[in-house]
Amino acid sequence: MTDRELYERDEATGQAEQALQDLCEGARSGLTGLGSLLLYSGSAGQGKTSLLARLRQAAARERDCTVLYSRGGEQQRNVPFNIVRQLFQPVLAKRSTEGRQELLDGSNYDLAAPALGLAVPAPGAANDPQGVQDALNWVVTQLAVREGPLLLIIDDLHWADAESLA
């Protein structure tokens, strides 16, 4: 992708690349608690997906940065945890069952694994939305701590399912 393909997007591209650089440099310096949110909004055809693709390319050049990507879709907006599964399944699929259980830390595994599509819910398991959300937050924290800087990119968030948004 060349700069000409992102005509008049230098400011937005620069902000994204600066945020990525700050994240990676902060992690290398041992700083914790870093984080930021970049939100691109606008009507269809304005190049938001291209901007996110550029950010993914920049993150790929940062060898110590873990990038998790997902994309909302009109057909999937009623599929619970669709966005969450797209984000986490690729990185969790690389691990053994034991490795996933270790990352999810015991009881969090029982709550998060069904939402992530890694296991079926236990028979008679109580519905605990807050517990699932806490377990998924734990996954994000553990990945950030263990894998270095963590970049979550969600394209077409307006099509995300309610469970992932929570």
Image (cartoon, helix red, strand yellow):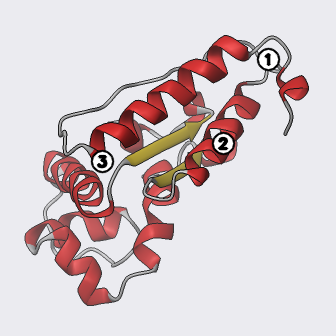
Element on which disc 2 rests? loop
Quadrant (top left/top right/bottom left/bottom right) for the C terminus: top left
Where 137 sits versus 5, above or below?
A: below
User: Which label's residue is closer to the chain start, 2 or 3?
Assistant: 3
Say which mark, if any, is on residue 28: 3
Q: Nearer the viewer, mark 2 or mark 3?
A: 3
Residue 101 figure quarter: bottom left
Q: Position of residue 52 (x, y in %)?
A: 65, 35
Q: Residue at x 66, y 42 (%)?
A: 73
Kindly identify the amino acid type of the residue bearing the numbered disc 2.
Gly
The local crowd at label 3, few if under 14, some if 14 to 19, many if 20 or more residues have their Cα within 10 Å, is few
Q: CA distance from mark 2 to mark 1?
A: 18 Å
Is residue 86 found left or right of 81 in the rendered image? right
Q: CA distance from mark 1 to mark 3?
A: 34 Å
Q: Which residue is mark 1?
A: 46
The local crowd at label 1, few if under 14, some if 14 to 19, many if 20 or more residues have their Cα within 10 Å, is few
Task: State yes or no: discs 1 and 3 in contact (Cβ < 8 Å).
Answer: no
